[in-house]
Amino acid sequence: MRKLTDAEQEKIKLLTKNQVSLTLIEPTQNGLKKSIMDATGSVRSFLKSENIHDYDQQLQGPNHKIIIPTIIHTGFEIIKSQASLYRPITKSGDPRIWFYKMTKIAEANDIIAIAFFDDSFQIFNLTQLDIEVLINSSIQNPLQDLIKEINNTQNEVAFELLGMLRKIANAGPIPSMVNADTSVGRTLETALGIDINSSKQPDYKGIELKSFRNSRTNRKNLFAQVPDWKLSKFKSSAEILDNFGYERDDDFKLYCTVSAITRNSQGLNLRIDSDIKQLIENSDKPEVGDFVVWTLDKLHNRLKSKHKETFWVEAESTRINDREHFQYKLVEHTKKPITSQFDLLIEQGIITLDHLIKRNSKGKVVEKGPLFKIKPKGIELLFPPSERYDLMT
C-alpha cells in the first residue's frame, strides 16, 4: 500500500475517535479493470479478528466463494452491493476480495476504508470523501447514521454496567469481603454478581473490570502471562524460584518487581529485542544470563483480548468498626489499547513485571503471575483518549 497522505491519516483518526474499526485496501488500475483485489495481510487479519471471515479455513475454487452484503457510502447516498471473498484454484489460492460496483466510487490507488456493521461491509473512499464534513453536517447522511448506530451498539453494555456501578456507589461504603490487597476487586465483583474465577476472559459482557484503591501511586494490573517455556532457558516457575527465591516468614518465595530500566535486588531486569520480537528476562548471574522469554505477539494479543474495553474503577478505602470498607467513586473507561506503545512503555519502566512465586508447606510451587502492571500515568499513553464517569452523580 502506498504511503497515506496527511489528510487520509486525519480521516482515519477521526473515524477511530468515533469507534469505527476499519482496515484499508488500495485498488490498482489492473485490479479495477479485472474486478479483483488481493486480500492483503492487514485485511485478512481484520476479517479474522472481527470474526467475519478466516481465509485459512476457506477451500479453493468458485464453489467455496463467500458473498457478504455491502453498503458503499458515497456521501449523502449509499449504493447497495456485495463482496466476494474467495481463493482461486490456480497457484496457492492467494486470498482475493472484491466489492461489486467498486468502479463507481474508486480510481486506481485510492485508499478504500473497510468497516463491518450490521452483518454488512461498510466501505467508503477515504481519499475522495470529506469525512469531517459528513460527520459534522447539519444534514443527516448515511455516514452519520452509521457512526451513531455503532456508538449506540458499542456503548449499550457500558451504560448498563455504569448504571449498576452507580447504584452500588450510591448505597454507600461496602465492607471488604477479605483482608487482602485483592479485596477491592473481589468486593466489587461480588456486589455485581460476578463469579470470582481465574478466567482470562473479560469480566462483564466483554468489559474488563479493574478496581483499585485511590492512592495515585498504585500500579494497576494489566494481565498475567507465563513465559514461553519452549523458547526459554528455564522451563518452569519452580526453576525461577530455586534460582532467585529467598526465605521469608517460614516461606520460600520470590515476590519482586522486574523493570527494564534498573536491576532489582535479585539482579533481574527486562529487555526487549525488537529484531526477534521478544521480551527477555535476564539475571546478572553469569551462569544464568537470559532465562525466560515472552513473544511480543503473545503479549500484544493478551493485551488486546483482555483490555478491548475496560472500566478502571477507583475506590476510597476507609475503616469502619476495624474493617476495611470501599466507596467506589470514579470510572475511567478505556478502549482498544495501542499495542505498539506497550513495548515502549516497558522500555521506559512504566510497564513492569511482578513475580509472585511461593513454595507451600507441601512443597508445591504456586505462581500467581507473572503480572504485567502499569503505572497510573501510563494509562493515557497505552490507550486512546478515555471517558471518565463520576459514580456519585
Image (cartoon, grey):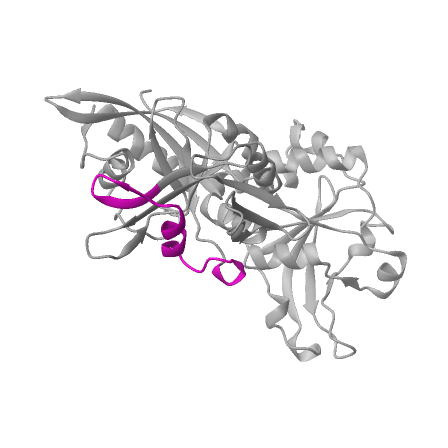
Q: State whether residue 133 is above or below residue 105.
A: above
* 75 drawn magenta: no
Foreground of the two, 98 or 340? 340
Q: Is residue 45 left or right of residue 361?
A: right
Query: Does 192 sit left or right of 45 as displayed?
Result: left
Name which residue lies at 49% across and 44% down. Answer: 308
**Residue 236 counted in the magenta span:** yes
* Residue 386 spot, x, y in % from top left: 51, 29
Please state if 191 lies on the left or on the right of 310 as rendered: left
Q: Residue at x 63, y 60 (%)?
A: 69
User: How far across and down, in percent of the image, does residue 39 sit?
Assistant: 72, 61
Stretch in magenta = 229-254
Give percent across and percent down for residue 80.
68, 55
The one of 342 and 63 positioned closer to us in this rendering: 342
Q: Nearer the viewer, residue 315 or 278?
A: 278
Residue 384 in sight here: no
